Amino acid sequence: MDYSRRSFIQKLGYSLPIVSLPLTSWGGSMKLLSPMGVQKRKGFHRNFKSIGDRTWIGADFWSVPMEDWEIKKGRLEFSGNKKSARLHFLTEVVQPTDGSLTMEAKLGLLEAKGDKGAVGFNIGIQDQTDPASIKAACYYGQGIAAGVSLEGKIFLGEKSSSLPVGFDFKDFSLKFVGDTSAGKSTGTLLAIDSQKRKAELTNSLEGTLEGLVALENNILQKDASTFWWSEVSLSGNKVVSVPDNSFGPILWSMYTLSDGQLKLSAQMAPLGKADTKVVSLELLKAGKWVEVAKQNFDPLSYVATFSLPYTQAQQDQPFRVSYRLGEVTHTYKGCIRKEPTRQKLLFGGLTCQNWLGYPYRPLVENLEKSNPDLLYFSGDQIYEENGGYPIKREPEDKAILSYLGKWFMFGWSFGNIMRDRPTICTPDDHDVFQGNLWGDGGVHISLEEWAKKRDAHGGFVQTTAMVNVVNQTQCAHLPDPIQAEPLPSGISTWFTALTYGRVSFAIVSDRYFKSGPEKIRPGEGRIDHIREPLPIGTLESDELSYLGKQQVAFLENWVTDWHQADMKVLLSQTLFSSVGTHHGPKKEYLTGDLDSGGWPKKQKDDVLRIMRKACVFHINGDQHVPFLLKYSIDEPKDGSWTYCTPAISTGYPRWGQPDLVNMPFTDRPAHNLPHTGCYRDVFGNDNYVYAVGNPDDDFREEKNRYVASQKKASGFGLITFDTQARTIKMEAYRFLADLASNDNANTYPGWPLTISQFDNDGRRALGFLPQLSLSEANQLVQVIDEESGEVVSALRTLGKMYRPKVYAYGKYSVVVGEGASQKTIAGLQLTTDPNALQNV
C-alpha cells in the first residue's frame, strides 16, 4: 500500500501543487499556481432545469450555508439571510495568467425585502492564510464582488453606477468579462433585464484575477432579498477545469474492524427524494470489483451503513463505494488496512474542530506523515459558529441540514485520511448544538426553558430526530452498540467495545447520562461556573449520575473480557478531572467547572475504581488544552493515567495555570515544569498533572489563522501501544509542527512520556498472593475476593510468571485463562513468603 507523501497530495484533490512549508512560512506568501491534473475545455455550463429538487447542488459546487441553497422546480434558489452567502464553483479555477474569462447567469428576484438586497458574482476568491486551499477559499476566501442591488446600483469592486429606471429584478441576466495582461486586470459587468434595459460598468481590478468564482447573495448586508438562478456558465482561457476538486455525491467513508466484523458508513450528500437511495459496497478481488453488500442511505442523515463478516484482516483490502445518480455511476475508493496484530499500534488522538484553523491543512499533512493505524475523533467535530454563520435550531428539517453542512466541513478536511484506516468518532456537546451537555439519560428540555439558563441545565435541546442524525453520521460505523434499544426519549445510544491491534477499547459517552448542575446548585446564569471556594462535598449527592447505570455495567463486564487483547483503553469525550483554571477570552479564573469530568466525584471515583482493575489507560479531549495526568481516588496517584489530547483548532481558550493563583501542590515531577504536580480541585480530586500545554496569551494579536491556532495550543496527539513490551508512549504535536526536524518547538513541555501498562493501577498493595507459574505465557489472570465476589484485578500477564497483588486481608480465588481452558484456584491468601509459588 502506498502511503508516500506524493500519493497523499494527489488524493487530497487540492486545486494546485502543495509544497511542504516550515513553521514560519504560513503567512500568505504562496500564490495560486497552475493546478495539478487540470483539463482545458471550452467552458462550463449548468442549466438547473434538468436537476431534480434537492439541497445538494452538485459535485462541481459547494454552497455556504449549505441549507440555504437548493434546487427547486428547475431553479437554483437561495432562501437564507447570511451576508455574503455563496455558491462556489469547485472544479473551475481561474489561473493567474494573462488571458480572459467570462461568467454569465440568468436570475431573478425570489423574495423581496424592500430595497434591501444585492446579488451577483464573486471573482478570484482566495484565503490569505492558505491561498492554496479550495476549502479555505470557500469559507475564508475574499474576492471581487460584481453585481446589482435593489437600490438601483450596478457595482464592480469599489466602483458603482446607476441601473436604468424601472430595472426588472424579477428576470434579468448578468455577464462579467475579465482580462489580465502584464499582471494588470480589468473587468466589465453587464446587466440586462427582460425588457432589454441594461447597464454596463468597467473597472480596473487589483492583481491578476485568480482563485475560485461563486454566485453570491446578500452581498452588501444580511437578511436581505433573495434570488433564484436558472443557468450559469464560465469560460475563457484563464479558466481551467480541475475534476479532482469535485465533492460528492459520495462525500467520504469511515470504517472500523473488530472481532471479525467490518462496519463501514458512507456519508452521502443531501440528495433529492427522486434520487435513488441504493448504495453499493465492493471489494477488489483477483483484480475485479465484486459487490458484497447493498444498502439504502437514511433519508435524514444520508448515511448508508454496511456490516459484514470480515476475515481478511492480515492483508490490505481495497474497497469502493458505488452510487448511480442519473446516468452516471460515482465511486469512492478506500482500503481496509492490514491489522497490526504483532507490532506497535499507533493511535491518533484528535478533538475539537473550531473553524479558526480550517481546513487544518498543516495538521492534516502532519497526521498523514505520522501514518497512525487508528484515528479517534473524540468530539466537537463541529462548532455552532463553524463556517462563519449561525446554526438553525428549528424547524427540525432545517436544523438537521444546518448540522450536516458543518459536519461536511469535517469530512472534507479529514475524509482522505479516514478512507484507508479505521476511525472511531464520538459526538460531544457542540455536535448536538449545546455549549455544555448534561444529557440526564436522554431527557429533553424545551428551547424556552433552555434559553433561561443556556448551557447550565440538564437535558437535550434539539429534537430526538436531530440528535439521532448526529449519532448516525458519527457512529454508524462503530461496532454495534451495547444497548440496542434507544433511551426513553427515543435517542439512540452508541457506547460500545472495539478490539484492534491487540488493544481493547471501551467507547463511552461521558455526557449522555450525566446529571445537570441544577440538581445540586440552584440559581440563575452560569451556575456551572464556580467562582468561589466551596467546602469539599458541597456539590455531591448520591442521586447524581455520571456515566449512567448502563455504561457502568458495561465497563464492569468489559474489564474482565480480554478476548484477543493485551491492553485496555477507555475512550471518552473529556478527562475525568477539573484541571483548567482560566477560561475564555478574558482569561477569567474559575475555582471549578461543573462541565468538567471531575464532577460528580463519588460517581466518577466509582468509574475510576473499575478502570484500575484492568490497568485501563484513558484517552479524551474537549478541554482545548493538552494534559497528561494521573487520577487519584483514595490517595494521590492511585488511579489510571489519562491523556487529554490537543484541540485540532481551539476556539474558546482555556489554561491550566494553578501556580498563577497560588494553588498548593505536592510531588512536582522531576522536569520541574510550572503548573505541574498534585493539585486538589474544588470537588476534592487530587489531580497529578505531569504536563500541560498552555496557549500563548498573545494569540488575539495574530492575524494569520494558522499561526493563531498554533498559539492557542492546537495540535494532535499520538499514542503508541507496544503490545509486546506493554508500554504506552504519549506524544503531542503542535498545529504547525515541522516533522522533518526534532525541534522542541514541535511539541509541548513535558511530552513525550512513556509509561508501563501496569502503571495504570496505582493502588498500594497490602501484600501478594503466591507467585503464579503459568503453563503458557501471557494468560488472563483474574483475582476475585471470595467474600464479596468482587473482581480485584483482571490482567493479561506479561510472560509466565505473575505475582498477584491484593489490597485487603481475606481469601481470594485466582482464575487463569479464558473460555474452556479456564482454571480456578480458590482459597489463596496473602503470603509473607517471597518464594511462595503456585503452579497453574
Image: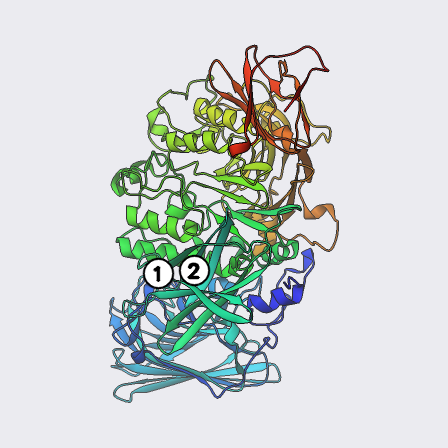
Q: Tell me residue 88's x, y (percent).
A: 44, 71
Give the residue type at disc 2. Ala
Quadrant location of the C terminus in the rendered image: top right
Q: Tell me residue 559's x, y (percent).
A: 51, 31
Q: State the residue lying farthest toward the right.
A: 742
Placement of 416 over or under 682, stated as above or below: below
Mark 2 or 1 closer to N-term?
A: 2
- Give the crowd class for mark 2: few <14, some 14-19, many >=20 residues within 10 Å: many
Query: Between 110 and 8, which is closer to the camera in this rendering?
Result: 8
Residue 813 visible within the image: yes
- In percent of the image, x 57 and y 41: which residue is there? 503
Query: Between 754 and 180, which is closer to the camera in this rendering?
Result: 754
Q: Which mark is residue 266?
A: 2
Quadrant location of the N terminus in the rendered image: bottom right
Q: Tell me residue 216's x, y (percent).
A: 39, 71
Task: State the residue position of label 1.
Answer: 297
* Cα–Cα gap, marks 2 and 1: 8 Å
Tag 2–tag 1 contact (CB < 8 Å): yes
Q: Which SS class for mark 2?
A: strand
Placement of 743 over or under 95, stated as above or below: above
Residue 388 visible within the image: no
**Exactly how many numbered labels are in the figure?**
2
Give the residue type at disc 1. Phe
- Give the crowd class for mark 1: few <14, some 14-19, many >=20 residues within 10 Å: some
Query: Between 432 and 763, which is closer to the camera in this rendering?
Result: 763
